[in-house]
Image: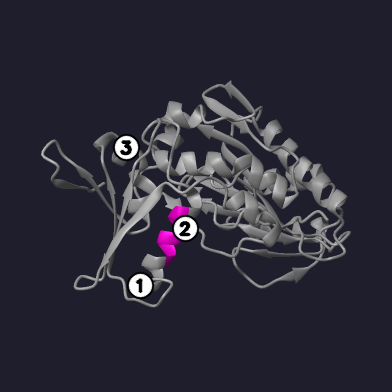
Amino acid sequence: MTRVPHTLSLHARVDLSGAEAAFERLLDWARRLSLGPLAEFSIGGGETHKGDEAELRRYRDIANSDGVVLAWPVSRGLDFVAGSSRVGRGWELDFRIDTSDPQAESTVVRDTLETLESCVIGMLDDPCVTNAIVRREGAGTARLPRPAEIDIGSTLIVTKGSLAWFFDDVDAVLGTGWDERLERDGRILLRRAAGLIDGLEYRHKVQEQQWTLARLARPKMTMYDLGTVPDEEWPIYHTGAPRLETVGYLESEHLLELSCVLTGPNHHIQGWEICNLAEIVQRRQLPDGRPIERVRVVFLEREQAMRERRPLLDNGIEVYCLDEEAELVRIEE
């Protein structure tokens, strides 16, 4: 049985000067999605009105508003909502599709995902679009890190400048195993797992890359999810031999200490190990109930500590390495 995500979304940032231009761009993308007649709308955060596009255009305050919210009738189990909002000198445009209705067939969800991805590909020809992303919520995403700008996206438009805000090494990010990479006029189209809606397949495709991106991210630029992994996804989530070994628990300090020895440059702490430690930090206790104030991981080599530090530090886990005199040295940011 195919487990589909409960939400699909398309988010784009556009350099447009006026509310009307942003509004027209939003409607144009809606037509590409073949959504049919509009059902209701609101302008500038005001009250919701029933009516179609013709009724919406009668409201003159669109030109001076900070955005609109549009909704279409539920179709084949899918619920479509779109919106525009002013951000700085530009606009953010969003489509959000609720696919959680049991009547939403997997083929319909897949077609919708592919249409959203095609829209983003087309945006590469639109010089007003500075960034765009198609992402999902639900099946295949639990306990995967979500680095800023890339999130859990399958089809994206980014720039090296935008990535540099969130990652230390942009070239490394662009070389993490994307299925497709196309550069045009300073913008970059990135694609992976295109058209995949099954949670099992999606996790298998992106899980390792997500943790690689989390290690490359700047401090506190990644969101970490500690949600429940479905049983059928567990073997993929929990793959790989553990890299951490418990040294002991210091009761006087409520400290859990672990050691890490990695035998090669392609060996990393497993994502599930980081999630386990993050839960301990969050709950402030071990699974057996003993209280925890600190968790620390000690590496034998500084190079390994620096390579692995980011997801650990982001989750409140202390990172140490041994210096030449075998003394503990703490790694900060």
Figure check: 48 above or below 26: below
Q: Amino acid at mark 3?
A: Gln
Name which of mark 2 and mark 3 comes first in the sequence: 2
Q: Quadrant of the N terminus?
A: bottom right
Number of other residues with Cα within 10 Å of mark 2, as a class: few under 14, some 14 to 19, many 20 or more:
many
> For residue 304, which numbered disc appears in the image?
3
Q: Residue furthest bottom?
A: 289
Figure check: 158 above or below 106: above
Q: Is residue 67 magenta?
A: no
Q: Classify residue 40 by image quadrant.
A: bottom right
> For residue 275, which numbered disc appears in the image?
2
Judge left or right: residue 199 versus residue 241: right
Q: Which residues are magenta?
A: 273-279
Give the alpha-carbon distance from disc 1 to disc 2, as whole Å. Answer: 14 Å
* Count of numbered tags: 3
Q: Which residue is mark 1?
A: 284
